Image: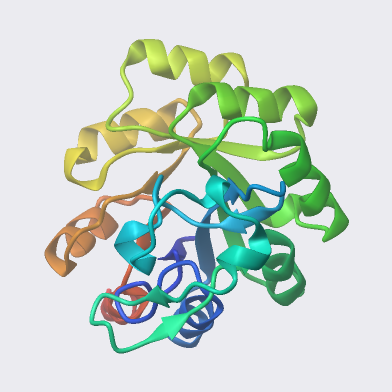
């Protein structure tokens, strides 16, 4: 099954990693949601991508500099500045979306979140419908050590043989390469190794169409409506 992941929700149109963005992504036809995990100063897991707050909130500092009560007062802005929403607790996200038939890509952005992420995923019966990912191999290695039943994905540019070997050593299920580095040959190679292939960094519609036609198993897109429309044409 091909998965159209709304990347931080429908982040082309709404404030990324917010409830309005996730809800719009589903409305646009996405059958998956991708999001990012960080920890607040008081230890709560929240959905936020960047190291700093500046780009999407205009505030100074990082998520870890503030309690969740403080973070909840900040506005998250969309690209146009037309829409605003609020920073979301990971558990509130799970309460809202775990009952759905969606698939989830949960990206770990910080160390020492692995155990609590797994505890919450277990609490909301998410094991069969999520993949835990990271650009940091140690994070997904830790996930496998804590609970090998969870699927993991390694985010990278294009994995070399050493990275492939590392992934195989922990029974990692998914390779997540940068979209503009993908070609027909390496998709076939990765499938031959038994990996699921999910693309990231799909910057525009032309790249989206090319990658889809290469036979990947999914991709994260800011504009899930365009991907869904293209799927219908194929």
Name the residue at 59% across, 37% down.
Answer: 152
Could you say where residue 98 lies in the image, as x and y percent from the top left?
A: 74, 68
Name the residue at 28% across, 29% down.
Answer: 158
Could you say where residue 135 lies in the image, as x and y percent from the top left?
A: 43, 33
Name the residue at 16% across, 58% down.
Answer: 207
Q: Is residue 136 above or below residue 105?
A: above
Q: Residue furthest left?
A: 206
Within the image, what quadrant is residue 72 found in? bottom right
Image quarter in which the C terminus is found: bottom left
Could you say where residue 232 lies in the image, as x and y percent from the top left?
A: 33, 81
- Closer to us: 154 or 77: 77
Q: Is residue 146 above or below residue 114?
A: above
- Closer to us: 136 or 104: 136
Query: How many labels were placed on the picture?
Result: 0
- Closer to us: 164 or 92: 92
Q: Is residue 109 above or below residue 35?
A: above
Name the residue at 41% across, 69% down.
Answer: 16
Within the image, what quadrant is residue 14 found in? bottom left
């Amino acid at each position: 099954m091909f998965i159209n992941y709304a990347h931080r929700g429908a982040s082309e149109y709404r404030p990324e990693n917010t409830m309005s963005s996730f809800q719009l992504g589903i409305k646009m036809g996405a059958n998956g949601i991708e999001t990012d995990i960080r920890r607040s100063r008081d230890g709560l897991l929240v959905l936020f991508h960047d190291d700093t707050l500046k780009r999407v909130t205009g505030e100074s500092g990082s998520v870890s500099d503030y309690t969740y009560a403080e973070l909840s007062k900040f506005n998250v802005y969309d690209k146009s500045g037309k829409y605003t929403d609020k920073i979301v607790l990971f558990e509130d996200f799970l309460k809202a979306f775990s009952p759905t038939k969606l698939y989830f890509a949960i990206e770990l952005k910080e160390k020492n979140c692995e155990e609590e992420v797994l505890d919450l995923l277990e609490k909301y019966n998410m094991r069969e419908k999520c993949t835990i990912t990271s650009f940091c191999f140690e994070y997904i290695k830790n996930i496998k050590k804590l609970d090998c039943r969870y699927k993991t994905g390694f985010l990278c540019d294009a994995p070399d043989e050493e990275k492939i070997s590392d992934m195989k050593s922990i029974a990692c299920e998914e390779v997540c390469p940068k979209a503009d580095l993908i070609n027909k040959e390496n998709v076939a190679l990765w499938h031959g190794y038994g990996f699921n292939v999910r693309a990231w960094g799909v910057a525009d519609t032309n790249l989206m169409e090319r990658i889809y036609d290469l036979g990947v198993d999914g991709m994260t897109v800011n504009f899930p409506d365009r991907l869904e429309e293209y799927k219908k044409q194929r």
